[in-house]
Amino acid sequence: MVGIMLASFLPADLLNYKIIYFSLIITALILLVLFWQSIKLRLVSLIIIFLFFGLWRYSVSLPPDTPDKIWHYNGQQISFSGIITKEPDIRQDKQKLEITASFSSTLKNNISGRILITTNLYPAFKYGDELAITCELQAPEKFNDFAYDRYLARYDIYSVCYYPKIEKLAAGKGNWLYSKIFTLKDKLINIIDFGLGEPAVSLARPIVFGGQRGLADNIRQQFSQTGLTHIMAVSGFNTTILSAIVLGFLLAVGLDRRRAFYLSIIFLLIYIILVGAPASAMRAGIMSFLVLWALHLGRLNKITNAVVLAGAILLLFNPKILRDDIGFQLSFLAVLGLIYCYPPIDKFLEKIKIPRLYGLRDILSLTLGAQIFTWPIMAYNFSQISLIAPLANVLVIWLIPFLTVAIIVALPLSFLLPGLASLFFLPSLISANYIFGVVKILSRVPYAYWEIGYWPWGVLAVYYLGVIFIIIKLQRSKLLDNRMGDKI
């Protein structure tokens, strides 16, 4: 992980020496075998192996600029065909399509690579559609201090084009299983749209399936100001807290720890399947499973190793997400925050006689624990800190499991009896209106959020070093030796 982090900040020229990094790995392996009996040399050899393996892994993930790659023709107008390999991203006034190119009629040759196309809302396209496209390819560029090029690079997208000429050639060319999942998802979304009116449907849809389609900009801004944007995203920050709260609720209603753990895992799996099992949801599911495991076992040292191992495995498949995927960063940090900050916070609240109030104190402890580790990343990337987020989460997040379950229960009932859909979705409507009311009121509170402007990365380093120092002190004072599972 350190090697990948180092490589992500190095100039591209230094990453071209793949053979040198690979040679250093082989050399260190030889030294490891020859001097295995020496603890110091063995440790040095292992450090060199993994450090340069991280450098090498990141370097091989960089795109080759060869004529068979579509990004080789950035700045030119070409015609090509390709398949939509990801569910279309529908916005209020446009749609974004991720295309995997296969053949260029301009070049009369096969080409490969992904391209992101922005086009009008209509005609609508679906996953698996094969399209013939004519457009001027462009390299993604930074705008408003946002590294859009690096943001797309994590998906191996190095070309974009805007409002091209598109002709649909065929349908159903994608993965069969994903096609069925997306078809089911579309039907379920239509049922939600029918059962709930605006603006409730614009909240219910992203809570269950992710995305923020149809949500007005001013409402989206209010959610950001109150620190509740995460409830509308299928991210580790969302599913981690949601999974922990579901486990706490099951324990609170009297289930034993083993059954509560397995039911929470089942809930998590159902949730991931419903959102279509995209990469972000799979990553979030892994992180959330680790939190449930921590709460089940209560072994901080072992779960920390598991979290680091899970992060390393995810980076092995895609090393670019360490620096450029905010979702990965928030997932990883939210888990660590719950592991290390939740127990002392809950113990402190218990010491000052804050009652549990049917799990509300646990929600506050979980929220504060996660946010201690994640708010600097939010501030660095979005230049805004929600000061009212702890209160907003206490007032809202307890309702998210109920709202999610209410929507899931209403879906099959509304499918069987569509005439009663409004009745089945009534609990969801009441819950959504409550959330909108809380967000609207809290966003108007003076100093509810802080616009901080540019946030130097050095401040983040100092902050996290300080948090690590405090955690070490707490460990030595035995505040983190209690079993986490006994705290919730």
Image (cartoon, rainbow, N blue to C red):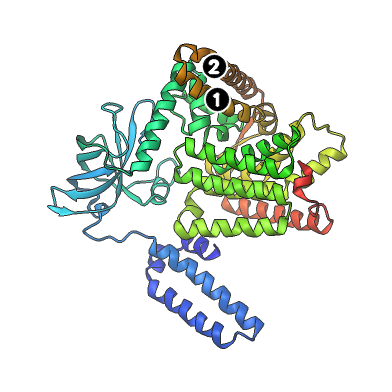
Q: Position of residue 30 (x, y in %)?
A: 50, 84
Vertical relation: 55 (above or below) 393: below
Examine the image and state in which quarter residue 441 appears.
top right
Q: Residue at x 55, y 88 (%)?
A: 34
State the count of labels: 2
In primary-sequence order, the first of circles 1 and 2 is 1
Q: Residue at x 27, y 52 (%)?
A: 71
The one nearer the camera, 21 or 168, is: 168
Residue beneath disc 1: 409
Q: Residue at x 48, y 39 (%)?
A: 273
Residue beneath disc 2: 424
Q: Position of residue 293 (x, y in %)?
A: 66, 50
Callout 2, which amino acid? Answer: Phe
Element assignment for label 1: helix
Mark 1 surroundings: few (<14), some (14-19) or many (≥20) residues within 10 A:
few
Callout 1, which amino acid? Answer: Val
Q: CA distance from mark 1 to mark 2?
A: 8 Å
Q: Are marks 1 and 2 in contact (CB under 8 Å)?
A: yes
The one nearer the camera, 19 or 295, is: 295
Mark 2 surroundings: few (<14), some (14-19) or many (≥20) residues within 10 A:
many
Quarter of the image with the N terminus in it: bottom right
Examine the image and state in which quarter residue 43 appears.
bottom right
Q: Residue at x 38, y 35 (%)?
A: 182
